[in-house]
Amino acid sequence: MKISKYPQKETWSELVKRPVLQREKLTELIADIFNEVEKNGDQALIDFNKKFDKVEVKNINVSEEEIENVENLISTELKQAIQQAKDNITKFHASQIVEIEKVETTKGVICWRENRAIEKVGIYIPGGTAPLFSTVLMLAIPAQLAGCKEIILCTPPDKNGNINPAILYTAKLCGVTKIFKTGGAQAIAAMTFGTQSIPNVYKIFGPGNQFVVAAKEYAQSFGVSIDMPAGPSEVLVIADEKAVPAFCAADLLSQAEHGSDSQVIFLSTEEKIFNQTIEETEKQLKELPRNEFAGEALKNSHFVLLKNLDEALEFSNLYTPEHLILALKDYEKYILKIQNAGSVFLGNYSCESAGDYASGTNHTLPTNGFAKNYSGVSLDSFVKKITFQHLSKEGLQNLGKTIEIMAEAEGLFAHKNAVSIRLNQENERV
Amino acid sequence: MKISKYPQKETWSELVKRPVLQREKLTELIADIFNEVEKNGDQALIDFNKKFDKVEVKNINVSEEEIENVENLISTELKQAIQQAKDNITKFHASQIVEIEKVETTKGVICWRENRAIEKVGIYIPGGTAPLFSTVLMLAIPAQLAGCKEIILCTPPDKNGNINPAILYTAKLCGVTKIFKTGGAQAIAAMTFGTQSIPNVYKIFGPGNQFVVAAKEYAQSFGVSIDMPAGPSEVLVIADEKAVPAFCAADLLSQAEHGSDSQVIFLSTEEKIFNQTIEETEKQLKELPRNEFAGEALKNSHFVLLKNLDEALEFSNLYTPEHLILALKDYEKYILKIQNAGSVFLGNYSCESAGDYASGTNHTLPTNGFAKNYSGVSLDSFVKKITFQHLSKEGLQNLGKTIEIMAEAEGLFAHKNAVSIRLNQENERV
């Protein structure tokens, strides 16, 4: 924990610096994996399962039977929880569907946009200790709402060749069309090129380790797009005199437990709240099962006492957190001052976990300062917006001279001619 | 021109193949330029102007005087044309502003999104024979509408060290905040790192040659985002018996004149229209000033006669054109069948030039098949969408159990605790 009280503004740029990621140069390794998968398809995936994940999987396809059986492996309680989360996420993402608005920009000239789903999308879900079925919800629900025809999911199998039941159950519930037992960079390669079993996709979503991150970047050179650049998770909490130190500490720790590279920042204007939150954080940390991760993460984290809330917002915008919690009495007053953040939680009862799981907002968010120029995942991430226009003969008459003059000024005479030939020709057939 | 009549569907995948781009490996050259600009700032740009563009520029800043004087260098006619285009582009892009809609996903749980402008954006405008002031309109207008604070523009100076007056005039008119005389990869490097004169930006827009394209890709590794991947311009025209061959030919040629790597595709269901369009294209080509480019482009282009319009739409979706013209009587019937396209022009009077200049739609569009997974530039390209949520105490009570169950199932106990601590604590202060 790094504690600063009333630091000079000139020092802020140091305070908001993120730990430099020691990311290995993986390009060659990734290129080799891509080559192998492009050449040998399913067999390459089976071989990589053996090599990297130490598991023999005869068939990378999850069978109908496995999917049917999963119902029995999930408790009713968890099913109900997943259902409530699904309902909320569906409601919020459905509200992002925009009605088509036709605009007559000049008499006879009508322009509009229509959404079309990206036809084929791929979701990557990491294996490991935490089975991220919540990420399945966050990616499959908007994909299905958008109308994507093919929604495939790749995730590494466990030591027995099985996929975590909660992931399988959620995928089935949310309309994932095909599920495959493959992970790592090879799964990303498979979704890029397609294999005998796995269809190629146009866009790949989802978190992963450094191999997956590097593979997603590499996939872009084959025309595949990705959800957003990756980085470790973060939260920044701003607390005034009405904040509850125990709540703030719990929020900071819920972020810190993600991994030792997570970062948490606490800003306060009240010294008493500030000190109590530090104490609470240390106290709660000891009781956590994942306190090793969280403890590591806290070492890189800043607790900063500031003069006033305007300063705190300025600091936050400079840092650009993935998650921002305003534990403030008058949080409404500060909403418009938020310039850079992924997702914002308002008041004492809006804990980050709510947005991580079940309130309805998406938890796939820009980290590492990318909220300066990227949005989190939303319905928009699964569609293209196509522009349409119709010009009547009158419309072209009203606009034609302008187009001709501009085209000529750019030296593009065929562009001009496409207008002139229409304006000059008396054609009864049209 | 490659002419196919009623090709078997199995051969379509060959017909929709784009010419392979001979793109040199520029990574090392680009990395050197970036290093140089990062180290020497403005002086590097002045040196590169000399080296690459053979022009001595003492100061890369466009002066107030140059901006003031430009008014006198533009004809009233062109000013009026630019104004009409600006009005339409403004109207259409302003219609993309979405009202904030708050959604109560569960009683006491309110979620919504708000737009925030990307604070600093950069526009690149190429030099060369065609002064693309229309692209200034297409990028600066939505940037200003979105509320970007810093909108800078880089473009290479001519042999006399001046910037094309139409570019300067349009930039001034559309709220560009600073203009710089620098082009090529070095301009992209300058916007990435910042120099003494040029502020760094978070997102870079605009077309360019292979050096600029490679530099934009490279800039992404420093956290800068870009408008979209680049490729040569394309149009696909679908014509039925009501189409006018002279119009179709003019549209095909207006695309072909962009460059020898442009591609145009003509699909028709009517043999008479098909043959007449081929004839007209050859005839009109001869009369064009840029017929060398257009002639080259036509060599790579397909004219395909098909059985019916459903087939034509299927072919078009497979090809995924940047521009799609439906020269059809009943174009409405086919709108919903369009799956992949950048921008669509409906009927006999909606020529592509209208959208290129003045109808209101944006002309910065995904080429090279990228319309499968990318949208064209719009107001959205200049904003981030931040999600917000507020949970009342009641809201958290309604949702808390779900969050606790899910967090526990993922093994994230600090996430669970952030809820439990709130639900369990009787706290009078909050």
Image (cartoon, coloured by chain):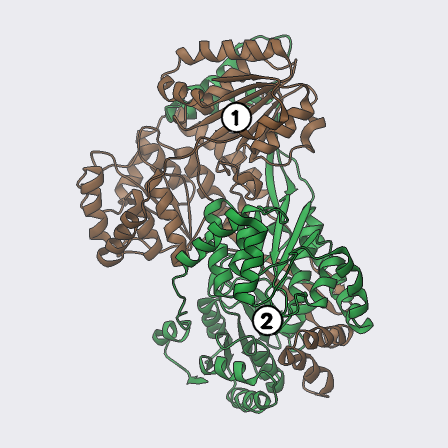
Chain colours: A green, B brown
Q: Chain of mark 2?
A: A
Viewer-side residue, A46 vs A108: A46
Secondary structure under badge 1? helix
Residue A107 visible in image: no
Viewer-side residue, B58 vs B190: B190
Q: Is residue B291 above or below residue A157?
A: above
Relative side of B318 to B308, left or right: left
Question: Depth-wise, is mark 2 or mark 1 nearer the camera?
Answer: 2
Relative side of A174 to A391, left or right: right
Q: Determine which of the numbered discs, if any, sits on residue B352 in the image.
A: 1
User: Residue A137 appears in which quarter of the rendering?
Assistant: bottom right
Q: Is residue A169 above or below residue A108?
A: below
User: Residue B351 appears in which quarter of the rendering?
Assistant: top right
Q: Where in the figure is residue B366, as x and y percent of width and height?
A: 51, 38
Q: Is residue B307 above or below residue B409?
A: above
Give me the C-alpha separation between circle 2 and circle 1.
52 Å
Task: State which quarter of the image contains the C terminus of chain B.
Answer: bottom right
Q: Residue at x 74, y 65 (%)?
A: A85
The residue to which callout 2 is attached is: A128
